[in-house]
């Protein structure tokens, strides 16, 4: 199953808009995070019922942001907390596509 969410990230660099694509295969989760002018695949993804977690790295022109995300999917909404080497980001989103 593929789920695509438009997201808003509250970061120390200001509010950033983006998109996240989840590819769900049983309890395994892979996908792509788009935001802060970057597009990156995430790794180590797991999903159990409505709870998910994954990690990765966003590379911008000036910095690399290593992150670990943990959150929930509920009624076509996404909510997550993202721990990074630049602070904690709060992420919310809504489902725009599912197949």
Image (cartoon, rainbow, N blue to C red):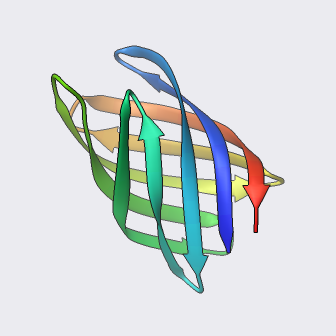
Q: In screen coordinates, is 84 left or right of 9?
A: left
Reply above or below: 27 against 50: below
The percent position of residue 72, horizontal first and vertical second, equals 63, 56
**Residue at 66%, 47% in the rendered image:** 5
Reply above or below: 2 against 26: above
Q: What is the number of callouts on the image?
A: 0
The percent position of residue 23, horizontal first and vertical second, equals 56, 70
Q: Nearer the viewer, residue 16 or 10?
A: 16
**Residue at 16%, 22% in the rendered image:** 62
Q: In screen coordinates, is 72 left or right of 94?
A: left
Q: Which of 36 and 84 is in front in this view?
A: 36
Reply above or below: 8 against 1: above
Q: Nearer the viewer, residue 9 or 83?
A: 9
- Find the residue positioned furthest to the top: 14
The percent position of residue 2, horizontal first and vertical second, equals 65, 67
- Find the residue positioned furthest to the right: 75
Q: Quadrant of residue 60?
A: top left
Quadrant, the C terminus: bottom right
Q: Quadrant of residue 73?
A: bottom right
**Residue at 16%, 28% in the rendered image:** 63
The percent position of residue 37, horizontal first and vertical second, equals 37, 28
Quadrant, the N terminus: bottom right
- Find the residue positioned furthest to the bottom: 26
């Amino acid at each position: 199953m593929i789920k695509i969410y438009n997201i808003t990230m509250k970061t120390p660099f200001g509010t950033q808009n983006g998109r996240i694509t989840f590819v769900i295969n049983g309890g395994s989760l892979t996908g792509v995070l788009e935001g802060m002018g970057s597009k990156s695949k995430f790794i180590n993804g797991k999903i159990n019922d409505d709870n998910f977690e994954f990690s990765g790295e966003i590379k911008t022109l000036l910095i690399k942001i290593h992150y670990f995300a943990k959150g929930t999917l509920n009624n076509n909404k996404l909510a997550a907390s993202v721990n990074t080497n630049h602070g904690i980001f709060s992420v919310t989103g809504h489902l725009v596509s599912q197949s």
